[in-house]
Image: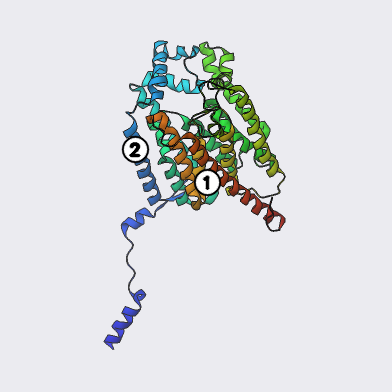
Amino acid sequence: MIEESMQEQEEFPESKPAEKERLTDRILTRKLTLKGITFQMVDILFTACLFILAFLIRWKLMPIESADYFGFLEPWMEAIRTNGGWRSLSMEISNYTSPYMYIMTLLSYISTNDLYALKLVSVVFDYFAAIAVLRILYHMTGNLRKSILGMAVLLLSPTVIIDSAYWCQCDIIYTSFLLYSYLYFLEDDGEKSAIFFGLSFMFKLQSVFLLPFFVIMWLKKRTIRLEYYLWVPAIYFISVIPAWIAGRSLKDLLTVYLDQSGYYPWGTLHYPNVYALLGEEMPDLRHADEVSGAGTIMTIMILGCIAYYLYTKKLELTEELMITLALFTVTITVYTLPHMHDRYGFLIDLLAIIYGVYRMKKLPVTCGFMLVSMLTFMPYLIAVDILPLKVLALIQLALIIYVGYDLYSQVSRAAATESGSSPSAI
C-alpha cells in the first residue's frame, strides 16, 4: 500500500505542495500605471537598462569631430560668442532657422565643450522620439512589450546613433516632433497634431515630407481639419520674434527656406533617389533648373495619383494601413523630389521602425531602409563609397515598390471588407 501511494505521488506531481513565489518574481511582476499604460517592474528595469546602455553607446562617440562640426557648427559657435551672444541673433551666422540658433546661443553661455553640448541636445531628442514610438505602437497594438521593442529599435538604430552622437546633426529634433504629430493624429486630436507639425516646421523644411499623408487623411475626413493648420505659420512667426527683436530683418527670417532651396541646385546631394539613376549628381549643373522643375511636378503628380486612388476607395483606415501609407508617401516624396541631401531619408527610417515592429515579419524592410541610409552616410563620414550611389538608388526603389505593393494589398482587402466582396484587381 505504501508503494502504491508513492507511485501515485510520482504520477500526479500536481498533488505536491505548490512552490512559494520567489521574492524576485513578486518584485518584478509588481505593476505601475503611467499615462494610462500599465507597466510591470521588469518592464521598467529593462527600459532603465536600455536608456543607460543607449546613452553609454552615444557617450563613447562624443569626442568624434565630424566635418560638419569643424566646418560649420564650431565656427558658428565662435561667431555667436564673438558677436555678443544674444546680440548675434541680429546677424545671419548660419543657414539654420532661428529656433536652433537660439539653442546654440544658449549653449554658448553655459557650455564649456561645444561639441559635447550640441550632441547632447540631439541625444535628448533621441529619447524624446523613442517615447513617441512607444506611445504610437501602444496605441496601435495595446501590446506593451512590442511597444518597448520599438523604442529599443529606435535607440539602438545605427542611423539615429550616428546622426546625433557621431555626426553632431539635429535631424532627430524635427522628426521627433513629427512623430508626436502622428501620435496625436492617431489619438484623434487634430489640433495638437497640427501644433507639433508646426514645431517641426519651425526647425526644418523637411517636415513637409509628412504633409502628403496628412492631406490624404484630410481627404478621407480623418482627424485633420484645415483650420488647425493655421498653427503652422503662427508658430513659425512666433519663433522668429526674438531674432527680429534682436535686430535681424523680418524678411530674411521669413524667407530662410526660400534661400535654402537655392543652395544645392543639382538633382541629388548624394541621396540615392531617381536623380542618382539619371546621373544628376553633377558639379557642372547641366540642365539643373530643367531637371528640378520637371522633378517637382513629377512628385506632385505621383502623390496626386495616390491621393486620387485612395479618395475614391471606400475603406476602413486601419492602423496598419495608415502607417504603411505614411511610410510610402514619405519615401515617394524623398525619392522623386530634387535637391535631396544624404540625411533626408532620416524620417523614413523612423517610420520604418513603426512599420516593421507593428508587423514583425516586415522588420527586414526596416533593416533594408536603415542599411541604405548607413551606406549613404559613409562617403561623407569616412570618405568611402561602399556601394555606388546608383546601386543604392535601385535598392531603395525595390524597398519602395515592396511598401507600395503592401499598401495596395491592404487597400484592396479593406475595400473588399467594406463592400462585402472579394478583393478586385484595382
Q: Please report the residue visible at 43 percent of the width from the left and 28 percent of the height from the top.
A: 169
Residue 7 drawn at (x, y percent)? 30, 83
Answer above or below: position of 132 versus 245: below
Answer above or below: position of 20 versus 348: below
Find disc 1 in the rendering and name its residue. Answer: 355
Label 1 SS = helix
Task: Note whether residue 363 is visible.
Answer: yes
Q: Is residue 201 left or right of residue 38?
A: right
Find disc 2 in the rendering and name its residue. Answer: 57
Q: Mark 2 near mark 1, Cβ–Cβ under 8 Å?
A: no
Q: Which amino acid type corresponds to the residue marked 1 in the rendered image? A: Tyr
Q: Count neighbours of disc 1 (C-alpha within 10 A) and say few if under 14, some if 14 to 19, many if 20 or more.
A: many
Residue 122 drawn at (x, y percent)? 42, 30
Residue 323 drawn at (x, y percent)? 57, 44
- Extreme residue in the bottom direction: 1
Which quadrant of the figure has residue 166?
Answer: top left
Q: Count neighbours of disc 2 (C-alpha within 10 A) and say few if under 14, some if 14 to 19, many if 20 or more.
A: some
Label 2 SS = helix
